């Protein structure tokens, strides 16, 4: 579903944030992307979602080249950034309807899809209020609902559990499992190693823009815990 | 004191985006910021030059007419102008600088007193306006020193009082700005109320100040008439005039005393009610009782357009700075239809304006549309929401056209209303009538497309206050310059033709200009179609 081949991104000023990164996320995968601060996680995720232009390498979504067919690729995926900066001048329902129009969600299904996810995240009653009045967690929930209602085949999330209350975090994990069961692929970054260990079937660790480890969770973890393995990799510089 | 200076420094750096000019890693970004600084310096030099030129021409005319005793009105007049300009520009800065600023939580959580926070905000406002006062008034003072015979005290009092001049208009504007925001905050649709109040007020004051400028042509009463006009426009200017130019210590004391007392009262009152005021102004209506019901669906373009239009309407500052051109245009054209062109020409005191209006009516409307550019800041206004624009599956051209359509939504109804009013007022031939609609419409598209392209090339997404992108950004400066250059083109061509005695019909030239604008529109839209994806991708 997602193929990253030799991705490199150098920022103005010369800093190479991502250096020859390659990985593949298949349908049904919950793929955790781990690294310390500044390792290149967000840069990779922003490149995958078409937010950030990149110079070298190739990104394919469901076989389609992101650079050649950006609109088609974007229509197959959903992105939730680490900080849910949404249109604060819109109400929650106006934002979701905006997403509905952009992703051409059929009129007949739109309300039911919104109802389904908004009820699960307990946000339905707040949808008539301005996003500016929402708490950080509510904005995060709204961003997640917006990402889910158009039934993406690839879900890309940057630190999705930050700001969510325990119940919402549990709901999101449940939904992630459900989506994978339906053949969707999930690629997400996290600092919470326990979550990655329990939730992901595959994990990649990025260090200084390069892939330090990648593969099925059990394989990457080896005999120890993911935490000890991660610390060992990071300290090995 | 250290706290105050530290707060002020951070605010100045953020507001004027100074750090990016010196510390940006990207050389291109650094160049852009330095270019903006250069443009701002150039604009300041131009305003100083205009102030000097206007003051000098006024002084020269008075001397030639043998009315040297009136020369003292030169600094008085420029003081009143600087104060009125300060007043108008500050009303819309209060929300964002004094209250409702984005970093409120961060600032208020620091271990500094509320009084220090307020002092730093008020000082920022004061510094911005002091700068403006200096560039308008210093040239007028120099002209008075050169052409008049000021008392020795003038040379000491003039520079000293310059620092007091902006205080009163700042207080007036702050009280009014906060008052409008407070009244609006009582309504659910606070932005609409804020906008309507601000727009009505601005137009009312513009009309009243024009009326105040009407003076008697009788030379024997001209002195009293000038004093009356200045007094009507801004009464404390007369105290200033009496004190600084005539050495009347009582008047000087009154001016300094009232300015300082009123300013002190603002700081005191503001520090007393700052937190409740802030809470009141930033509070949102929450109902949390929404029930899902069927929704209106539409195309991606419609969704983007509605989103963009809502964003536009959500910022009274954005609307005030862009729709004011269209509103003034409509007011002007309806004034012409209602009062008749002769009366309006006399009211505006434009020499030869009668003939000029008949010939250049479409260009005048186009000029108002040049001031109505929403697109020049529409890309920057995405700010932290840029990720949405870049991650949604929409053709870049559709996205850009939604922004352009909002600009045309503001401009085209105004063009239509202006055209209808001018048809009524000028009774043109059908060919001339068509021109009244066609040229301003083509020019509107030009302004909208040029503004969009300029903002794509010079965006700013890291603003802390909307004022930075709406009023002070490079893209807004450049778009305004592009508009003025567009308007200036046919005028310069006619002036050159006149100078070199080349026979040229104004009407014919304007038709050629209309066709040129149509072609330029086509080129700009083609460029957006061709390169839009690359430009958006580079943001």
Image (cartoon, coloured by chain):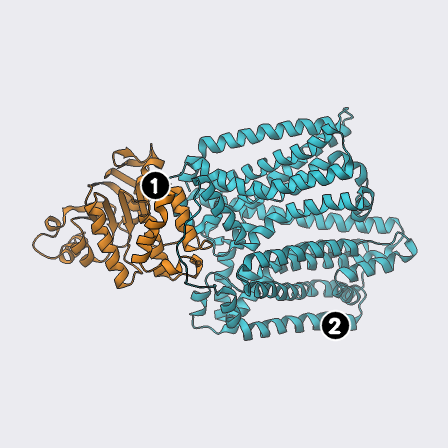
Chain colours: A orange, B cyan
Q: Image height check: is B201 above or below B521?
A: below
Numbered circle sitting on residue B437: none
Q: Considering depth in this image, is A1 or B527 the residue closer to the camera?
A: A1
Q: Which residue is mark 1?
A: A50
Q: Residue at x 62, y 47 (%)?
A: B43
Q: Which residue is mark 2?
A: B254
| Image location of residue B442, percent across then percent down | 61, 33
| Image location of residue B380, percent across then percent down | 48, 47
Circle 2: element type: helix
Q: Quadrant of the C terminus of chain B?
A: top left
Q: Is residue A137 visible?
A: yes
Q: Which residue sits furthest right? A: B220
Q: Is residue A96 left or right of residue B269?
A: left
Q: Considering depth in this image, is B233 or A167 the residue closer to the camera?
A: A167
Q: Residue at x 62, y 73 (%)?
A: B264
Circle 1: element type: loop
Q: In whole angstroms, how far apart are the C-alphas of marks 2 and 1?
A: 63 Å
Q: Image height check: is B50 above or below B416?
A: below
Q: Is residue B461 visible?
A: no
The answer to whether dots 2 and 1 both sit on one chain is no
Pointers 2 and 1 in contact (CB under 8 A)? Answer: no
The picture quadrant where one finds residue B267 is: bottom right
């Amino acid at each position: 579903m997602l193929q990253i081949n030799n991705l490199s991104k150098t920022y103005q000023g010369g800093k190479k944030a991502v250096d020859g990164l390659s990985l593949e996320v298949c349908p049904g995968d919950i793929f955790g992307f781990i690294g310390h601060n500044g390792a290149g996680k967000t840069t990779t995720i922003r490149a995958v979602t078409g937010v950030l232009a990149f110079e070298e390498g190739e990104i394919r979504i469901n076989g389609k080249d992101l650079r050649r067919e950006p609109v088609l690729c974007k229509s197959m995926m959903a992105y939730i950034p680490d900080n849910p900066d949404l249109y604060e001048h819109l109400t929650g329902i106006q934002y979701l309807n905006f997403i509905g129009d952009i992703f051409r969600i059929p009129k007949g299904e739109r309300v039911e899809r919104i109802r389904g996810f908004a009820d699960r995240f307990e946000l339905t009653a707040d949808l008539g209020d301005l996003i500016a009045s929402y708490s950080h967690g509510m904005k995060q929930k709204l961003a997640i609902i917006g990402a889910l209602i158009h039934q993406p085949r690839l879900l890309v999330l940057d630190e999705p559990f930050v700001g969510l209350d325990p119940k919402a975090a549990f709901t999101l994990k449940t939904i992630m499992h459900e989506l994978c069961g339906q053949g969707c692929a999930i690629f997400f970054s996290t600092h919470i190693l326990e979550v990655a260990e329990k939730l992901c079937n595959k994990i990649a660790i990025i260090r200084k823009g390069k892939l330090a480890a990648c593969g099925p969770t059990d394989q990457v973890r080896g005999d120890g815990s993911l935490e000890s393995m991660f610390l060992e990799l990071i300290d090995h510089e | 004191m250290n706290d105050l200076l530290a707060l002020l420094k951070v605010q100045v750096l953020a507001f004027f985006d100074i750090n990016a000019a010196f510390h940006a890693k990207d050389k291109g970004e650094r160049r852009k910021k330095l270019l903006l600084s250069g443009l701002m310096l150039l604009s300041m030099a131009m305003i100083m030059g205009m102030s000097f030129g206007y003051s000098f021409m006024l002084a020269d005319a008075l001397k030639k007419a043998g009315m040297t005793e009136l020369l003292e009105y030169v600094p008085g007049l420029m003081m009143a102008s600087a104060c009125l300009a300060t007043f108008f520009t500050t009303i819309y800065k209060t929300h964002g600088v004094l209250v409702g600023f984005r970093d409120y939580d961060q600032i208020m959580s620091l271990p500094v007193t509320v009084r220090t926070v307020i002092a730093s905000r008020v000082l920022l406002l004061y510094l911005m306006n002091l700068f403006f006062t200096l560039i308008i008034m210093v040239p007028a003072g120099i002209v008075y020193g050169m052409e008049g015979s000021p008392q020795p005290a003038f040379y000491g009092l003039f520079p000293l009082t310059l620092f007091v001049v902006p205080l009163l208009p700042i207080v007036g504007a702050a009280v009014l700005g906060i008052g409008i925001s407070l009244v609006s905050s009582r309504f659910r649709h606070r932005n609409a109320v804020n906008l309507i109040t601000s727009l009505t007020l601005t137009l009312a004051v513009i009309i009243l100040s024009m009326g105040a400028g009407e003076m008697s042509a009788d030379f024997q009463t001209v002195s009293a008439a000038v004093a009356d006009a200045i007094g009507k426009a801004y009464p404390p200017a007369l105290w200033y005039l009496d004190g600084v130019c005539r050495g009347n210590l009582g008047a000087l004391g009154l001016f300094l005393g009232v300015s300082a007392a009123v300013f002190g009262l603002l700081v005191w009152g503001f520090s007393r009610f700052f937190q409740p005021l802030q809470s009141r102004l930033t509070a949102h209506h929450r109902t949390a009782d929404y029930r899902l019901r069927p929704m209106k669906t539409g195309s991606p373009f419609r969704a983007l357009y509605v989103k963009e239009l809502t964003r536009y309407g959500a910022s009274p500052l954005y609307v005030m700075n862009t729709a004011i051109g269209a509103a003034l245009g409509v007011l002007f054209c309806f004034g012409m239809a209602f009062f008749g062109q002769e009366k309006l020409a006399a009211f505006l005191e434009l020499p030869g304006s009668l003939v000029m209006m008949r010939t250049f009516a479409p260009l005048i409307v186009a000029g108002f549309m040049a001031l109505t550019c929403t697109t020049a800041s529409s890309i920057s206004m995405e700010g932290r929401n840029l990720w949405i624009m870049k991650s949604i599956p929409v053709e870049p051209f559709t996205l850009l056209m939604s922004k352009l359509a909002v600009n045309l939504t503001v401009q085209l109804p105004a063009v239509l209303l202006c055209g209808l009013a001018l048809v009524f007022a000028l009774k043109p031939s059908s060919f001339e009538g068509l021109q009244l609609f066609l040229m301003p419409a083509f020019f509107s598209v030009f302004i909208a497309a040029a503004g969009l392209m300029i903002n794509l090339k010079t965006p700013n997404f890291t603003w802390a206050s909307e004022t930075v992108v709406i009023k002070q950004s490079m893209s807004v400066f450049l778009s305004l310059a592009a508009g003025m250059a567009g308007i200036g083109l046919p005028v310069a061509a006619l002036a050159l033709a006149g100078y070199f005695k080349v026979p040229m019909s104004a009407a014919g030239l304007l038709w050629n200009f209309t066709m040129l604008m149509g072609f330029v529109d086509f080129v700009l839209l083609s460029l957006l179609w061709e390169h839009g994806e690359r430009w958006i991708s580079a943001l």
